[in-house]
Amino acid sequence: MVPRNVTNIPMHPFSSLPPASEKEQAVQDMFTAIAHWYDLNNTLLSLGLHHSWKRRAVEMSGAAAGDSVLDLCTGTGDLAVLLARQVGSEGRVIGLDLNERMLEFGRRKIEKLGLPNITLLTGNAEALQFCDRTFQAATVAFGIRNVTDIRTALREIYRVLKPGGRAVCLEFSRPVNKPLRKLYDLYSFTLLPRIGRFISHDQTGVYNYLPASIRAFPDQERFKEFFLEAGFSPVTYRNLTGGIVAIHAGVKPSF
């Protein structure tokens, strides 16, 4: 697949966001273009913090030995790897993503680590191909903001979870401290695009899209409302690194 030049796609006037009608294809083109550099850039641009953020999300998922877990927007499979170790050889992890290029790198990683309890599949978070009440837990790490209809994706997660199952979403959020928020905006909109483009030689505009998509994403309380609207209860969230990221967790009631 040859990525289109996303800079030629009409952008939302708010920022570097494509309009909703173009979003899915634009996002896929961008991530196809940077798949080779994705893991390296995650580490460099987060100063290595993404590893600890992901470990915390897996802990909050409540996934236990023998469980079946769904990892949406799995990308190159970082969270799927952590989940596979947590559920053990008797459990299973399904990693789902629309981007086949990202999944290729994920499969190489999983094969190298020797984790046969992970399966990576192509699929859309807004129309999951699984039966109702299939998984004990579902996770999404840094992917839900790339979904065109977030509410639909949350309803789909709710559907495929077993009663009592837990959904966990790790996503960039709104720093709670105003000086930190200003510093983070400076980094996100100035340094991050330059570093990302330099490392990956990207010409698609993905490193302008990423901070814009973070800015447009609902803050902690609003995103909590999305979980509640989907049927989860209770819903909690935990801020990490001053609210630069937040982990939202919701439980599917057992009734």
Image (tube, rainbow, N blue to C red):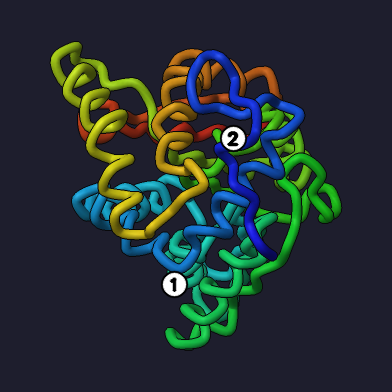
Tag shown at residue 85: 1
Q: At 34% from the left edge and 21% from the top edge, which residue is drawn?
A: 174
Residue 254, can we see it?
A: no
Q: Which residue is mark 2?
A: 251
Q: Disc 1 vs disc 2: Cβ atoms closer than 8 Å?
A: no
**Residue 38: image location, x then y, percent:** 42, 60
Q: Quadrant of the N terminus?
A: bottom right
Q: Residues within 10 Å of mark 2 (few under 14, many from 20)?
A: many
Q: Amino acid at mark 1?
A: Arg
**Under tag 2, what secondary structure?**
strand
Query: Spatial distance from mark 1 to mark 2, Cα to Cα?
Result: 22 Å
Residue 101, can we see it?
A: yes
Image-based side of 126 in relation to 106, left or right: right
**Under tag 1, what secondary structure?**
helix
Q: At 33% from the left edge and 50% from the top edge, which residue is drawn?
A: 196
Q: Quarter of the image holding residue 31?
A: bottom right
Label 1 vs label 2, nearer the camera: 1
Specify the farthest residue to the left. 179
Instruction: Give above or below for 25 relative to 89.
Output: above
